[in-house]
Image: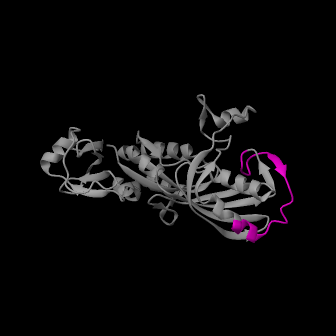
Amino acid sequence: MGVNGFLNIDKPAGNTSADVVTKVRRWSGQRHVGHGGTLDPMATGVLPVCLGQATRLASFITESHKTYRAEVMLGESTDTYDSEGSTTASADPTSVTREQVQALLPSFSGAILQQPPMYSALKHRGQRLYHLARAGIEVERPHREVQVFRIELIDWQPPRLSIEVECGRGTYIRSLAHDMGQALGCGAHLTALMRTSCGPFDMTDSLSLDRVEAAFRNDDWRKLLLPMDTVLGRLTAVTLSEADERSVADGRPIAIDGDPGEGHRRAYSADGRLLAVLRFLPENGLWQPEKVFPQRQ
């Protein structure tokens, strides 16, 4: 029988996010396994893994705020914007001061324009950019607006520095490191990256891949699962009547009193089972079932 929920895994360096998903799928025997936000192979930290019906809620993770701790090396630019790439330019960074870096950071805060790196999973005419990059082909990448809610210098050991970044969807920390180096006039690249939070998932509660594997081996891994509504905490909860339960199960909109607020609500049965995510329809004032979770009989 399928199992629904999330595992908060601390992804080790050297594994892709897809590698972790493949391992959990094999260990669990579950067909539907996914993740909530890709981490580069060199990166470590919080990787929410979704099982069963929880895979349908992955968008609530990818749209959430993330926090990263990044180590940046000044004086050298690379084609991947990190330490796994080839050097493209170098310059003496010894004249760069902590005060200069501090003064620069506000320009990387708020709504900023960022060019994705060539070595990324974005597509150009149906092909992944990193495939083109490995073939020696560089294409235009339009700058995109991303949100950086907070960026702080947390360590200064020149030519290395460390920053903590809280950001929204689509922000490339590698690009931040590269762009900082360009602005400082000496070049820079990312040497280490850890995601410390991803929506409601935090590093303090994450599980090592070894710990997860051992739990599967001992067949007590279900104790590690977080419930599906873990990612829905910001949505107002409503309890449905039996009649509304039947309507929602059939995909029919229902009426709910009160201010629609953010436009989504999580719906429960009287005995506390998560039934659906509802979306407000302003044209008729009703709530449409957007994601319905079949109940076991």
Residue at image point 29% right, 53% down: 266
Q: Residue furthest left?
A: 243
- Is 230 contained in the magenta span? no
Residue drawn at 20 percent across, 38 percent down: 250
Horizontal arrangement in the rendering, residue 223 relative to residue 43 (left or right): left
Q: Is residue 79 above or below residue 221?
A: above
Residue 24 in the image: x percent, y percent? 48, 47
192 on left or right of 165: right
Say which residue appears at 69% left-offset and 61% top-offset.
71
**Magenta stretch holds residue 100:** yes
Which region is colored magenta?
80-103
Residue 283 is left or right of residue 23, and the answer is: left
Tally of numbered discs: 0
Name the outermost residue toward the right.
Answer: 92
**Chosen colour scheme:** one colour
The N terminus: image quadrant: top left
Left or right placement of residue 249 versus residue 131 in this view: left
List x then y, in percent, for residue 185.
80, 56
